[in-house]
Image: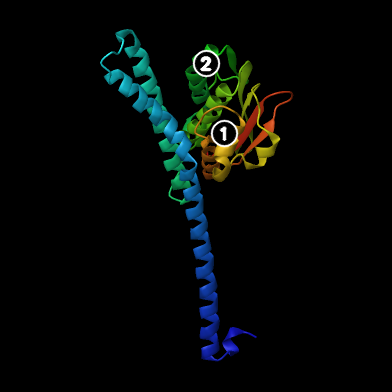
Amino acid sequence: MNDQHLPDNKKLEKQVIALQRQLETAKQMLELKDHQIMNIFSNLSHELRTPLNGIVGFSELLCGTDVDQSDVKQYVAVIEESSNMLMSVWNDAFDLVKIESGKYNVYAEPFDLNDLIYQLFIKYRPLAEKKNLQLFLENLISEEFIVSVPLNELNKVLEKLIENAIKYTKQGWIKIHYKVEGKLIIFEVEDTGIGINESVRSKLFHSFTAEEVSKSRNVSGTGLDLTLCNGLVYLMGGTIEYRPSNGQGSVFCFSVVNHHR
């Protein structure tokens, strides 16, 4: 029956029922968001303790009366590294909370993509070479290629994936590659590292399993890197996926929308 033929009290009753359903749906969504945010912070307990222990422990050594001056530089380096790790963990968690709560905004801006890729190559090549790894680019990047993409977010995703590839690769190489398909730019970061257990591949980009994924690779880290990458890529209009490399290793592939005309 059409609503216009219902008595006024029936119309009001129907509107109240519809409003109650909307309120219940909104309540469930808020509870889910709260649960997701709490899971992010619950996964931080171990990751925060590790750098904090480094800072506190080596600070106490520096304050000791019998500290050997030859060790001071080493202690300070550990404190600096632990401080940077702590800041990284906190920034990742804060960004994730903003993404989960819908308060993280991204803005496309024009820039030279080839220059960005080259700067990342220059930045991470020494770190790779320190582990006797080869970092190389598959694209020809000598020519300018202007795109319009959220620069900071794209840079952050690429940095996370390159850092993880270097961290989880003991020998071999890391390759950075991108291609253009219409409005999409598709990036790949491939490595010859330890790969990821099949049992957790379907959970890679979920914050509530981030710690489990991190432990599966037997190397310390924030455990939230891939969750953050997933959120940022989504905000840039793309998707991210993992697939095992041919043989041993990993390939992380993600896309972003290019707004350049």
Q: Determine which quarter of the picture holds residue 212.
A: top right
Percent coordinates x, y for residue 86 in the rendering:
40, 31
Residue at x-position 47% and y-position 54%: 34
Q: Amino acid at mark 1?
A: Ser
Q: Is 79 on the left-hand or right-hand side of 153?
A: left
Query: What's the distance in space between the residues labelled 1 and 2, CA to CA?
Result: 24 Å
Residue 127 versus residue 8 in the image, above or below? above
Residue 175 versus residue 71 in the image, above or below? below
Q: Are marks 1 and 2 in contact (CB under 8 Å)?
A: no
Q: How is the image coloured?
A: rainbow
Q: Is residue 257 visible?
A: no
User: Which mark, by number, is residue 132?
Assistant: none
Q: Secondary structure at mark 1?
A: helix
Q: Which residue appears farthest toward the right when viewing the image?
A: 247
In the picture, the quarter occupied by the N terminus is bottom right
Residue at x-position 30% and y-position 13%: 67
Determine crowd level at label 2: few under 14, some 14-19, many 20+ residues with C-alpha closer than 10 A: some
Q: Is 80 on the left-hand or right-hand side of 114?
A: left
Q: Amino acid at mark 2?
A: Arg
Kindly identify which residue carries mark 1: 214
Residue at x-position 43% and y-position 35%: 48
Residue at x-position 52% and y-position 74%: 20
Q: Determine which quarter of the picture holds residue 199.
A: top right
In the picture, the quarter occupied by the C terminus is top right
Residue 119 versus residue 93 in the image, above or below? above
Is tag 1's residue or tag 2's residue first in the polypeptide sequence?
Answer: 2
Please name whichever residue, 202 or 55, is drawn nearer the observer in this view of the structure: 55
Percent coordinates x, y for residue 254 in the rendering:
61, 36
Q: Which residue appears farthest toward the top when viewing the image?
A: 70
Kindly identify which residue carries mark 2: 125
Q: Is residue 55 visible?
A: yes
Percent coordinates x, y for residue 146 in the rendering:
51, 30
